[in-house]
Every structure is written in structure tokens, then in C-alpha cells.
Image (cartoon, grey):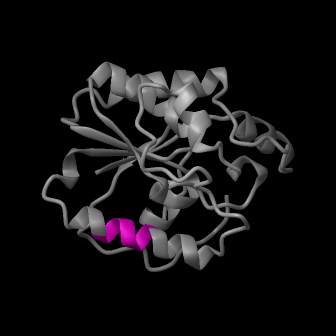
């Protein structure tokens, strides 16, 4: 499968400059983030993808849009691949509001409040990633899947820190990272 970190968000822009939480809930992509999403769509065009799994955060949904449009792929919204809840940006948008903003996507299986109420311990996110890895490994067509996700979740799956708009391949049948280092 291919893992893609969402494009630059308003949170990433401000946090990157100050290293302080700017207090932006469920931020949208910046103009650079939108260009990164378009670039990912072009780069992934020849990869033989058949579906997109995407986190319910706005920045991930906006990143998936040009890819789904360009490659004519179905998009499946799943909270399993969401970011670790640790900053204001990890306060999500209720499912009914997401359905209003993204009417072409199906949020029916998403709980109204789908993000945690408190900061997630690292071990919890690592366990969520391990479960996702096992579920994907059990699918015969895991190679045809694009997962649009976040820094922390991708870190737990691969042990690698990836930049906004960066993508990498992940074999869920291979070994999981031995150790996760939670540093940006």
C-alpha cells in the first residue's frame, strides 16, 4: 500500500514557524498544501491504485480530493488512520458537518464525534496502527490501496517521519517498526 501524509495545513504552517500550538481546530490545507495534493495526484497516476482510505480530518479529505478526481477512485473515510490526538488541530469536525462540506463522500459509518476526548497515549496510537497493519495484511488487494493519513499514524506504521505531501510504500505483511521515536 502507499501511505501519503496530507498536504501542509494552516496548523503545520504556524506550528512550523513557532513550534507552538496555534489553536486551529481541524485546519484546512494552505495553498502549498493544495499544490502538494495536486502533485501527489500526478505522481500517483501510474501506481495502479484502486481505492483511497482517508482520515476524517479536513486536511486529509482535502488532500484525497484531487487524487480521487484524477484517478477516478472511490474514497473510504475511516477514523482508524486519523492522527494521534495531541494538539488543537486534532479536534475534529462532527460527521454531519463533514457530510455537508464533502457531500460526495459517505460519512454514514462515522460517529458524530469520532476523535478522542483527551490526548491519546503513544501506546494507544501504536496499537491502532498495529491493528490496521494486520487488517490490511489480511486483504488480498492491499497493494492497490492509498492511505491518506498523518505524521503520527504513518510514523507508527513505518517508523519514518514524513513531510507534508510525502508518500511512501508500506508492506503490511512485513515487520512492524521495532521502535517508534515520537519527535517531529
* Residue extending furthest toward the left: 140
Question: In the rendered picture of this protein, how many numbered marks are placed on residues?
Answer: 0
Q: Quadrant of residue 133?
A: bottom left
* Residue 34 in sight from this viewpoint: yes
92 sits to left or right of 34: right
x 60%, y 71%: residue: 181
Asked whether 81 or 12 is in front, the reply is 81
2 sits to left or right of 114: left
Q: Is residue 89 above or below residue 45?
A: below
Q: What kind of secondary structure does the magenta stretch mostly adopt?
A: helix
User: Residue 142 magenta-drawn?
Assistant: no
Residue 6 in picture, x, y percent from top left: 53, 39
x 42%, y 32%: residue: 105
Q: Quadrant of residue 130?
A: bottom left
Q: Is residue 177 above or below residue 82?
A: below
Asked whether 61 or 174 is in front, the reply is 61
The quadrant of the picture occupied by the C terminus is bottom right
Q: Is residue 41 above or below residue 97?
A: above
Residue 4 in picture, x, y percent from top left: 44, 43
- Segment tinted magenta in the rendering: 129-134
Asked whether 151 or 124 is in front, the reply is 124
110 sits to left or right of 176: right
* Residue 164 in sight from this viewpoint: no
Residue 68 in picture, x, y percent from top left: 35, 27
Residue 79 in picture, x, y percent from top left: 49, 54
Q: Is residue 114 above or below residue 6?
A: below
Q: Quadrant of residue 122?
A: bottom right
x 20%, y 67%: residue: 138
Amino acid at each position: 500500500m502507499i501511505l501519503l501524509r496530507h498536504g501542509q495545513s494552516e496548523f503545520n504552517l504556524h506550528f512550523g514557524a513557532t513550534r507552538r500550538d496555534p489553536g486551529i481546530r481541524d485546519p484546512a490545507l494552505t495553498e502549498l498544501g493544495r499544490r502538494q495534493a495536486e502533485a501527489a495526484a500526478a505522481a500517483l497516476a501510474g501506481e495502479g491504485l484502486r481505492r483511497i482510505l482517508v482520515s476524517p480530518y479536513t486536511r486529509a479529505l482535502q488532500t484525497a480530493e484531487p487524487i480521487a478526481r484524477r484517478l477516478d477512485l472511490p474514497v473510504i473515510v475511516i477514523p482508524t488512520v486519523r492522527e494521534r490526538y495531541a494538539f488543537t488541530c486534532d479536534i475534529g469536525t462532527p460527521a454531519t458537518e463533514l457530510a455537508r462540506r464533502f457531500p460526495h463522500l459517505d460519512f454514514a459509518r462515522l460517529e458524530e464525534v469520532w476523535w478522542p476526548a483527551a490526548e491519546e497515549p503513544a501506546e494507544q496510537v501504536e496499537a491502532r496502527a498495529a491493528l490496521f497493519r494486520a487488517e490490511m495484511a489480511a486483504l488480498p488487494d492491499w497493494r492497490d490501496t492509498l492511505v491518506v493519513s498523518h505524521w503520527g499514524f504513518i510514523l507508527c506504521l513505518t517508523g519514518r517521519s514524513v513531510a507534508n505531501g510525502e508518500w511512501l510504500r508500506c508492506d503490511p505483511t512485513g515487520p512492524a517498526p521495532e521502535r517508534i521515536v515520537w519527535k517531529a
